[in-house]
Amino acid sequence: MSQTATVFSHDPAAGPVSYPSPSVRFARALDSLFDKVLNESDFDFIADMRAHGCDVLDMIEVLETAALRLGEEWDADRLGFVRVTLAVSRLQRILTSLSQENHSVETQIDGRSILFILPRGESHHFAVSLIEERFRVIGWTTRLIVADRASELAKVLKQNDFAVVCIAWLDCNLLAQVESVLHILRTVSDRDRTLLLAGGKAAEENAAWLCERGIEMVCCDAQLTLRRAERHYARRSRTAETLQIAGSNPEPTQIV
């Protein structure tokens, strides 16, 4: 196909997609959403999902799985470019509405912060926006930046003590732009405090290359990213507490 659609990618050789929940409630909510994003331009997603008994995280999983299903349909030539593009644009609008609906959710001022970086030229924003929202609704402070200018990215990193930085890389043609981002991260980031992750189709295909340049893990899904980030923050907090205790209990001065 000469055109490309902004959908979650899935390698058919890896077998069928494993959807996040086997529950009947989730399946019905997913079927309802999938039908509507393909056929209706205007509907109340939040009200519909609440009618199915879904909470905010359920809604995010439904959106994610709907995007994966669109990718499967696209890869199998069961849906054309126009229908898939319209459906993804509807999913993006739904995610924006959901984010606004949950804007009152307060993040916890405890240091759990993550920066998502999109390399310059990356046009696939929906996947990373979903993951960012997943982090935000469970209390993380999140920020998403497009690395258009090296100086701006370096400034953001210097001014903020992010616990985690994650490069979202989906377009395989952006290797040079990602290399530029990696150079800034190696130069500016405090590797003892900041966990460097990457995710996306292109990141998975270039995992070894990324790890050679400082990325600690390439995550294949949102759940893995979240678990790895939580583990790192817990370890970082324990280290800070140990140092604080050591600083408040100095060794007694020996008189010779």
Image (spheres, rainbow, N blue to C red):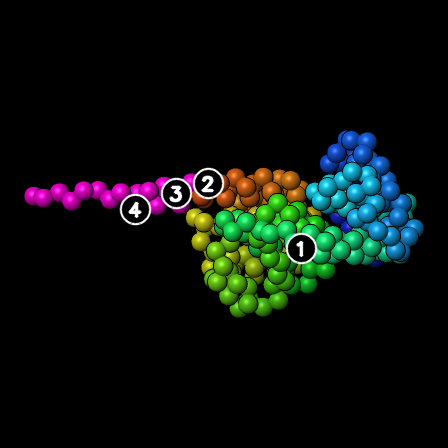
Of callouts 2 and 4, the N-terminal one: 2
Of callouts 3 and 1, the N-terminal one: 1
The residue mark sitting in front, 3 or 2, is 3
| Image position of 57 with respect to 132: above or below | above
Q: Residue 3 location in percent, x, y? A: 83, 57
- What label does residue 241 carry, if any? 3
**In percent of the image, x 87 and y 52: which residue is there?**
43
Q: Which residue lies furthest to the right in this view?
A: 39
Q: Which of 183 and 196 is in front in this view?
A: 196
Q: Which amino acid does label 2 sit on?
A: Arg
- Label 3 and label 2: CA atoms lie apart by 10 Å
Binning the other alpha carbons within 10 Å of mark 4 as few (below 14), some (14 to 19) or many (20 upward) gives few
Of callouts 3 and 2, the N-terminal one: 2
Classify mark 3: helix, strand or loop.
helix
- Label 1 and label 2: CA atoms lie apart by 29 Å
Q: Does the magenta stretch include residue 250?
A: yes
- What label does residue 36 carry, if any? none
Q: Residue 199 location in percent, x, y? A: 64, 48
Q: Is residue 71 visible?
A: no
Q: Mark 4 points at which residue?
A: 247
Of callouts 4 and 3, the N-terminal one: 3
Q: Is residue 16 visible?
A: yes
Q: Mark 2 points at which residue?
A: 235
- Label 3 and label 1: CA atoms lie apart by 31 Å
